[in-house]
Image: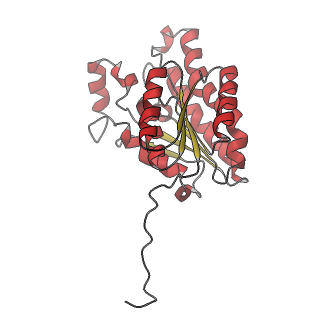
């Protein structure tokens, strides 16, 4: 073989090694799979939860059993005081973070004419306000990191709306505008902000939807199935990696082909 023959570089099995990643709402669902995937890639993980402490500990145990580092931190992301306490705890135990994934979210579905002020406020305060709160306390970390990454989990519902989900659609649509704005402010620091918009995914949220409604939703999906949480994690991993260093302010749909 000639000395000038080019050799293929092997893929890095741990593309997130040396980085600390916080995933909100990561005790279950999409957040859990993101946390596990980041750990497989070598990152130190902060598993945030609100009420599911046992489930969060289970995620931590899986990560540690694989030889990686993880801590659990309870905080209601809609409460700025709790989020500030979470930031202090994370900084004391692991130092500054490199990657923040704003995944935590809730639903309170009802036709708009019947929706209460409480149902509106709870969803907006958690899904949109929680993203503001967490980004606010970790913004300096992301801005200063060598490869700072902000990744917000929106939804196809935030792109096209959905019957009975005025509060949820508004909160997820707001994340898109928030992401694009923060991307502009982070760009001068070589840090990025991007948004992933999954379609309807097999999580606790979807389990609450009546089967007749699920069938109507499935009929709108060209791939004729709901997403598995693992269908989403590859894109999130990519956005957290060095490979995505030139991608910012983008909204990436993972929705089985649903139009928006």
Up the image or down, 31 lies above or below 85; here it is below
Tell whether 151 sits left or right of 33: right
Whole-percent x, y for residue 138 in the image:
68, 37
The quarter of the picture where residue 254 lies is top left
- The residue shown at (42%, 86%) is 5
Q: Is residue 7 above or below residue 201?
A: below
Q: Nearer the viewer, residue 19 or 257?
A: 19
Q: Tell me how the rendering is colored.
A: secondary structure
Q: Name the residue: 59% across, 23% down.
A: 75
Residue drawn 70% across the image and 48% down it: 186
Residue 121 image position (x, y, % from top left): 59, 15
Q: Nearer the viewer, residue 198 or 213?
A: 198
Quarter that holds the N terminus: bottom left
Q: Is residue 135 visible?
A: no
Count of labels shown?
0
Q: Determine whether, in the image, residue 253 is placed left or right of residue 152.
A: left
């Amino acid at each position: 073989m000639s000395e000038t023959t080019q050799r293929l570089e092997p893929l890095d099995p741990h593309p997130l090694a040396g980085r600390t990643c916080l995933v909100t709402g990561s005790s279950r669902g999409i957040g859990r799979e993101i946390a596990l995937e980041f750990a497989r890639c070598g990152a130190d993980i902060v598993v945030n939860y609100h009420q599911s402490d046992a489930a969060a500990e289970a995620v931590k145990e899986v990560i540690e059993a694989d030889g990686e580092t993880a801590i659990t931190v309870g905080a209601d992301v809609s409460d700025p005081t709790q989020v500030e306490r979470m930031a202090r705890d994370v900084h004391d135990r692991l130092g500054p973070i490199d990657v923040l994934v704003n995944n935590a979210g809730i639903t309170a579905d009802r036709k708009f004419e019947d929706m209460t002020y409480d149902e509106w406020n709870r969803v907006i305060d958690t899904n949109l306000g929680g993203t503001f709160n967490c980004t606010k306390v970790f913004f300096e970390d992301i801005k200063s990191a060598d490869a700072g990454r902000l990744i917000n989990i929106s939804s196809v519902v935030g792109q096209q709306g959905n019957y009975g989900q005025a509060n949820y659609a508004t909160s997820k649509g707001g994340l898109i505008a928030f992401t694009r704005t923060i991307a502009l402010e982070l760009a001068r620091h070589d840090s990025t902000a991007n948004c992933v918009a999954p379609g309807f995914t097999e999580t606790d949220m979807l389990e609450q939807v009546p089967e007749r409604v699920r069938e109507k939703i499935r009929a709108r999906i060209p791939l004729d199935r709901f997403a598995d949480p693992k269908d989403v994690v590859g894109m999130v991993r990519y956005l957290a990696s060095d490979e995505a260093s030139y991608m910012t302010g983008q909204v990436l749909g993972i929705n089985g082909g649903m139009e928006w």
